[in-house]
Image (cartoon, helix red, strand yellow):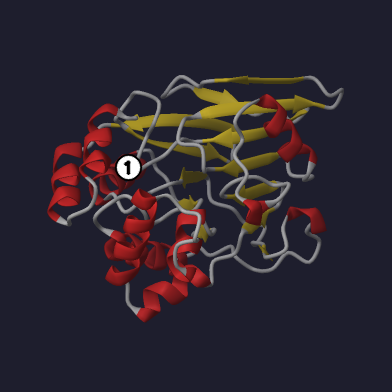
């Protein structure tokens, strides 16, 4: 895979304080994965599916760890993909694992973060700590939560937050995670906005007259009532974006969560996509 992670000297300052860019020679098909959450079974199923789609590059939108039973494996995979040229940005669970849980954090995520941190070695923690909040390539922006305040971890809960994010950047397409449900937002030059839930497997032309914000949904922990793993493929040749759902062995993933002594609810929710 070809690398495209060089600094972009012409990046807009509003696109994040910790900003990294990329070269202007993108792949034909780019797979976007986010919120992997240490779910090896889901990640492996998505990577196999992506390879069958002819994907040549990957963008990883953060939250590599948290909830799942395979944080070390997931971080090592991300390191390998980044070394081969993939985009990767920091997620809030990654940041919390590096720094330790906040005092106001609820008991369940606190337990998971403490357990996850204990599973990672110094090199794996250093990789997470070194991830940028935002990356750009040409007119594409990659961020975990939003473009208006990447380090604040604010959620895009509806169209108003999506518009706020779109107005904070000059990017034609913003790819973000954090929300575990797939959705696509758009904003016209006249200020008219819209959003919808994409149909899996249907290519959507991202028209140049609009700005777009794409939320692929979570690879490792979908929460829209469908347990199948989420990801999306952006075809740079024709500017189309295709959302995908990939069934995987969530029973094994759940059994590993229970065996690790993590909260059983984290295993149960995988079966129902909640």
172 left or right, relative to 257: right
Q: Quadrant of residue 186?
A: top right
Residue located at (31% from left, 48% from top):
43
- Extreme-bottom residue of the structure: 122
Q: Viewer-proximal residue, 93 or 123?
A: 93
92 left or right, relative to 223: right
Q: Secondary structure at mark 1?
A: helix
Residue located at (22% from left, 31% from top):
271
Label 1: which residue? 46
Q: Badge 1, how many Cα within 10 Å: few under 14, some, many 20+?
A: many
202 left or right, relative to 75: right
Q: Viewer-proximal residue, 261 or 77?
A: 261
Q: Viewer-proximal residue, 233 or 29?
A: 233
**Quick check: can you spot residue 249?**
no
Q: Position of residue 272 (x, y in %)?
A: 27, 27
Q: Quadrant of residue 133?
A: bottom right
Q: Position of residue 12 (x, y in %)?
A: 81, 55
Q: Position of residue 62 (x, y in %)?
A: 48, 54
Residue located at (51% from left, 71% from top):
129
Count of all numbered marks drawn on residues in the image: 1
Name the quarter where the C terminus is drawn.
top left
Residue 68 versus residue 4 in the image, above or below = above
Q: Quadrant of residue 237?
A: top right
Q: Position of residue 89 (x, y in %)?
A: 54, 58
Residue located at (16% from left, 51% from top):
256
């Amino acid at each position: 895979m070809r690398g495209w992670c060089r600094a972009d000297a012409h990046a807009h300052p509003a696109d994040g304080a910790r900003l990294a860019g990329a070269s202007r020679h993108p792949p034909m098909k780019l797979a976007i994965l986010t919120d992997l959450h240490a779910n090896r079974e889901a990640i492996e199923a998505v990577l196999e599916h992506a390879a069958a789609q002819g994907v040549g590059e990957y963008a990883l939108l953060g939250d590599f760890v948290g909830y799942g039973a395979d944080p070390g494996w997931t971080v090592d995979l991300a390191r390998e993909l980044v070394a081969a040229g993939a985009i990767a940005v920091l997620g809030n669970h990654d940041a919390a694992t590096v720094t330790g849980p906040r005092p106001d954090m609820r008991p369940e995520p606190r337990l998971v973060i403490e357990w996850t941190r204990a599973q990672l070695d110094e090199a794996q923690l250093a990789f997470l700590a070194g991830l940028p909040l935002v990356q750009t390539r040409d007119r594409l922006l990659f961020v975990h939560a939003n473009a208006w305040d990447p380090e604040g971890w604010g959620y895009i809960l509806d169209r108003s937050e999506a518009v706020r994010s779109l107005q904070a950047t000059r990017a034609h397409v913003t790819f973000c995670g954090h929300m575990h449900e797939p959705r696509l937002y758009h904003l016209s030059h006249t200020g008219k906005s819209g959003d919808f839930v994409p149909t899996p497997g249907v290519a959507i032309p991202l028209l140049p007259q609009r700005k777009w914000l794409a939320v692929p949904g979570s690879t490792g922990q979908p929460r829209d009532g469908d347990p199948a793993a989420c990801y999306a493929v952006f075809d740079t040749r024709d500017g189309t974006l295709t959302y995908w759902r990939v069934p995987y062995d969530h029973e094994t993933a759940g059994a590993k969560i229970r065996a690790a002594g993590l909260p059983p609810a984290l295993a149960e929710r995988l079966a129902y996509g909640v």
